[in-house]
Image (spheres, helix red, strand yellow):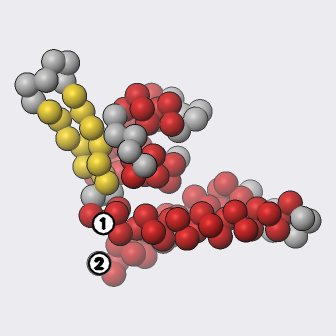
C-alpha cells in the first residue's frame, strides 16, 4: 500500500480523502496507519494549516521521496513490460506480481536511504 500512497502524494493527491479515493480499496484506518509510518520514516511530511476552520491537513513528499520517484517510475515502466511479457505466457514462477513490486519498492527505498 505504501507505494501507491507515495505515488498518490507525488501525483498531487495531498489531502486524506483525496488519497483514500485515489488508492482504491484502502480503508481510512489503514491509510492513517500507513501515513504515520511514512511520516516516521521521513518519506512524507504532514502539514497542518493553523487558523483554518476546519483544520486542513496536507501531505507532501520529502526531498528524499522526490529523489526516489524517478526510480519508482523506472520500476513501474519495467513492471509494465514484465506484465506484458507475463501475459504472453512468460512465467514468473509463483511470484504474485503485486507483492513483488511492493517488495522491490521497499528494497529500493531502504537501499537508497542507506546511501544518502
- Which is more toward the observer, 37 or 10? 10
- Asked if the residue at tag 2 contacts the one at tag 1, i.e. Cβ–Cβ closer than 8 Å, the answer is yes
Q: Tell me where residue 53 appears, x and y as whole percent.
A: 16, 18
Residue assigned mark 1: 64
| 107 up-or-down from 37: above or below | below
Displayed quadrant of residue 111: bottom left
On-image quarter of the C terminus: bottom left
- Near mark 1 (Cα within 10 A), the count class, few <14, some 14-19 or many ≥20, is some
Q: Estimate the spatial distance between the alpha carbons at disc 1 and disc 2, rounded to whole Å.
A: 9 Å
Q: Could you tell me residue 46's position as x and y percent?
A: 24, 43
Of residues 67 and 112, the one nearer the viewer is 67
In this view, the residue farthest toward the top is 53
> Would you say 101 lies left or right of 91 here?
left
Residue 89 horizontal side relative to residue 72, left or right: right
Placement of 109 over or under 25, stated as above or below: below
- Front label number (1 vs 2): 1
Which residue extends farthest left?
A: 51
Amino acid at each position: 500500500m505504501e507505494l501507491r500512497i507515495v505515488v498518490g502524494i507525488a501525483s498531487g493527491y495531498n489531502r486524506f480523502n483525496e488519497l483514500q479515493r485515489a488508492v482504491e480499496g484502502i480503508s481510512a484506518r489503514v491509510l492513517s496507519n500507513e501515513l504515520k509510518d511514512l511520516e516516521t520514516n521521513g518519506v512524507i511530511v504532514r502539514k497542518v494549516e493553523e487558523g483554518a476552520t476546519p483544520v486542513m491537513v496536507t501531505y507532501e513528499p520529502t526531498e528524499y521521496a522526490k529523489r526516489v520517484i524517478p526510480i519508482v517510475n523506472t520500476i513501474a515502466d519495467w513492471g509494465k513490460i514484465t506484465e506484458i511479457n507475463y501475459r504472453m505466457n512468460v512465467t514468473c514462477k509463483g511470484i504474485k506480481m503485486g507483492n513483488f513490486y511492493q517488495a522491490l519498492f521497499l528494497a529500493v527505498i531502504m537501499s537508497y536511504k542507506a546511501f544518502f
